[in-house]
Image (cartoon, rainbow, N blue to C red):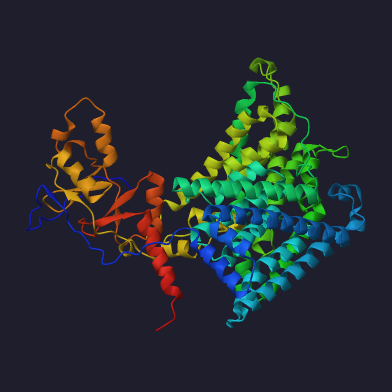
Amino acid sequence: MAMALPHCAMVGRSISPLVKVRKVSISRRVTACAVGEGERAALRQDRDSSNRNGTVYARAMDSMPPEGFAVLMSCGVGLLTGIGVVAFNYTVHEIHDIVWHGVPRVTWFRSQPLAETWKQIMIVPVGGGFVVGLINFLQSWIDRSDSKLWTKVQALSRPLLKSVAAAVTLGTANSLGPEGPSVEIGASVGNGIGSAFRSSRERTLALKAAGSAAGISSGFNAAVAGCFFAVESVLKSSLAADSAGSLTTAMVILSSVLATVVSQAGLGSDPAFKIPSYDFRSPAELPLYLVLGVICGGLSISLTKCSAAASSLFDNLQKSTGIPSAFLPPLGGLCVAVIALAYPEVLYWGFENVDAILESRPWARGPPADLLFQIVAAKVVATSLCRGSRLVGGFYAPSLFIGASLGSAYGKLAGYIISHANPMYHLDALEVAAPQAYALVGMAAVLAGVCQVPFTSILLLFELTRDYRIILPLMAAVGLSSWIASSYISQEKSGSLDATSSKDDKEELCYVEESLCVTDVSETKLAKELLVSAAVREDYLAVTPDANVEATLFSMLREKKWCALVIGSNKCLEGILTLGDIQEELRKPSEVPQKKVSDICRTNVVTAKLRMNLESAQRLLANRGLRQLPVLSEDGQVVGIIDQDAIKLACRVEATKKLLPMQ
């Protein structure tokens, strides 16, 4: 945190007006290979090993630029992801039609006597849980094998068995959704193609992003939202260089388009759910949507915390009773079945549940407001129990259903209150829109709050409705919901910035929705284990407070430093001077070069301590928007500086060490 810098004891040797405290020489430089050489080498090796004689093919591959081949790989990712998502959805529908034969829609259960339907409601979700438990047991058995022969089997079986488990979970109507598995299918395809062509780490990440975009695009039939999802979830901190960023963006767009085309060919061109007729009658309604955004933010926090509590509940149950993990999914299915006896709407039935809330089908009749509030609570509990019991699925569809139910109930309640308000308040002039309008906004607001993808949520609803009138209330509610949910999580973590801090925001999001973390998180987890001392850079530039600004600037340019640390005669940090600070001063009509460093440097400096973990340092850099942090010892003396590149390098080195054979 920002604070006044402490004084420390006098050190015998004084500092000259401009002196480098420490300069570490680099004994050797490693020159990085050009991006794309791995792909070319793999192609040439594959061509030679298979004894290809086609000189035209060889010349084409040798003459193709790496960027062109990267685009071709992203197109392959989009096509294969589209095919995989279509096959996954067909599998879900086939299982659903078999086990729920004779049930036209989920609302049908409310019109039938419970004595005639309770057996099917109880048996099907529990049976699906047993199958998922067996699949999870098979995967854990494969993962425990140490044989090198099983290495490739493990890599292939993990996404395949997980997709099958998700299909069974959703086909038996347990309370999760298909979009998360669709994203993971795309990410697995991207990772597989990157590994097959020995792509660099950065190129493989771009292919995973392309696969993630393809998964969302094909799942919702919304290509634009898919592109934004990839940027928000996978590439949030990766588009550093303009050239790499533009290439990655092109890969994501092409993959998203091709996956959508394949999905439309296999599943039809209709949107994921039918949009009802709705209207926004007055700008005066905007405060009502702001209140809805606040409520959705609070509900998003409740869903996240309820999921964590359910996971702890099943973990403690397993530890206390010794029950095998394969029996946890059936218990989750049993819980869903019991809830469904009273609230059958919690069962996954595609997006027909959402259509019923939106009243967008001829047969749909929305429940009253009081029942909708009960359904929201039941769905939150059922979804949390499914996730905690190791059933497989995503949070997107449940979030949309919960948001639609909450928004519809809120709209009905607001309309009733305003229409029956006391005339002295003059609320009769306020025309409230139909509940469907609030349901649509609630869907996006809850999705943004739970999964922290606000732009994706806005673009998804806008792309599905194709109505500009929804934008203003949508942006207002989504912005508030996302801010409230993220602020609550950050506030929970802000008190623990030491080596023993708990799960960070990213880990919580990964737990809630696994498709938000399709990247390799092994190095990210190391940031919690490693201390700042493992990544501190000791080659920093130090100046005294009375140093000349012009001389300091030339030293920064000569040494290629972003900043200079201002250190007093007592060896303590007194401030920091960056190139940006000097630029700001040069724009003012004053004699900046003749000034002293102490006249323009920043004295309220955010610092890191040697025994702080790298995760906490990363959070400080991100939250404050800083490029680097001065590092202080326990007695307050300057040790060096730390930045994001140093943190990533330290984690990469540690991860590499762990892969080395034991000596």
Question: Image point 68% across, 56% down: which residue?
Answer: 81
**Res 438 seen here:** yes
- Looking at the image, which is closer to me, 9 or 349? 349
Q: Answer left or right for 659 relative to 400.
A: left
Q: Hey, which quadrant is residue 440 in on the image? A: top right
The image shows residue 398, relative to residue 385, as above or below, that is: above
The image shows residue 467, relative to residue 404, as above or below, that is: above
Q: Answer left or right for 95 relative to 113.
A: left
Residue 53 place in picture, x, y as percent: 64, 70
Question: Image point 38% across, 44% down: which residue?
Answer: 625
Q: Which part of the image, by quadrant, shows the C terminus?
A: bottom left
Residue 157 place in picture, x, y as percent: 67, 71
Q: Hey, which quadrant is residue 593 in on the image? A: top left
- Looking at the image, which is closer to me, 236 or 57? 57
Residue 498 place in picture, x, y as percent: 37, 59
Q: Answer left or right for 352 relative to 256.
A: right
**Res 451 seen here:** no
Question: Image point 69% across, 62% down: which residue?
Answer: 392
